[in-house]
Amino acid sequence: SQTIHQWPATLVQPVGSPLSLECTVEGTSNPNLYWYRQAAGRGLQLLFYSVGIGQISSEVPQNLSASRPQDRQFILSSKKLLLSDSGFYLCAWSFPGGRSNQPQHFGDGTRLSIL
Amino acid sequence: QKEVEQDPGPLSVPEGAIVSLNCTYSNSAFQYFMWYRQYSRKGPELLMYTYSSGNKEDGRFTAQVDKSSKYISLFIRDSQPSDSATYLCAMKGKNDYKLSFGAGTTVTVRA
């Protein structure tokens, strides 16, 4: 079976500091990977997705970037955090290729607070 | 107009009641429909996944899709306190990577 891990679970960072959130998936090869942000009382907003190593698509122009250095590793980064970057960040995976219409499965998220 | 509309509630019901949740959508290209359950400070957990109009049942959960009306529902029978959570509807078009989510409905089941 497949599992997804995200860390850290909680993070408090000062404005202007860098950010690195990591997500890994086990139990499947070449998954589609996703980063979402969830604001209080609002639905999830897709930030980035990746269909393979080094392939990143951005959905929302912003202060964040994503990278996929290995098949099952997805990283969300920022060089200088803004107050508006606070939120709940969720990583998700889905099967690739012909099974891409299968649902996405989420990790337990990172709660990011910017001070 | 939002692409997906979901009544945010909150919804409070007694244990054993039927919980009824629904979402409407405007994009006729949506073909795949999901319901997720999200406990506080956790990620969303997939409950139901459907891709055709009609009903799909899984234990105490029934998902209903009406593509002609652009309306989906989730019913929870014999609700339990452990069903207390936020329920999110989500949907996508064929070969889309992006899921479009409702804002979520918070449900409390009172013992």
Image (spheres, coloured by chain):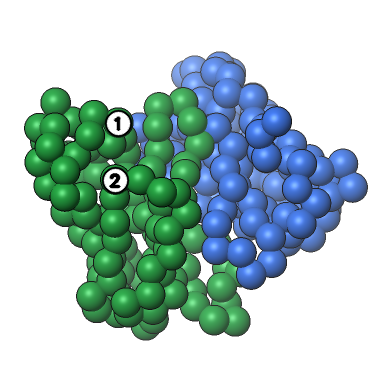
Q: At numbered mark 1, what does the secondary structure look like: helix, strand or loop? A: helix
Where's residue B61, x and y in %? Answer: 64, 45
Q: Nearer the viewer, residue B82 or A24?
A: A24
Q: Nearer the viewer, residue B73 or B8?
A: B8
Residue A108 visible from this viewpoint: no
Chain A palette colour: green
Task: Give amino acid for label 2.
Answer: Asn
A37 to the left or right of B111: left
Q: Quadrant of residue B25?
A: top right
Q: Chain of mark 2?
A: A
Q: Eyeballing the image, is A83 above or below B47?
A: above
Where's residue A40, x and y in %? Answer: 40, 27
The quadrant of the rendering that contains the C terminus of chain A is top left
B83 to the left or right of B74: left
Q: Eyeballing the image, is A99 above or below B92?
A: below
Chain coloured blue in this rendering:
B
- The residue pinned by badge 2 equals A63
- Mark 1 vs mark 2: give the one in front: 2
Q: Earlier in the sequence, mark 1 or mark 2?
A: 2
A61 to the left or right of A22: right
Q: Nearer the viewer, residue B61 or A24?
A: A24
User: How many marks do you count on the picture?
Assistant: 2
The residue shown at (41%, 49%) is A61
The residue shown at (81%, 43%) is B70
Where's residue B73, x and y in %? Answer: 72, 39
Marks 1 and 2 in Cβ contact (< 8 Å): yes
- The residue pinned by badge 1 equals A84
The residue shown at (69%, 67%) is B94
Q: Quadrant of residue A10?
A: top left
The quadrant of the rendering that contains the N terminus of chain A is bottom left
Q: Residue lying furthest right in this view? A: B68
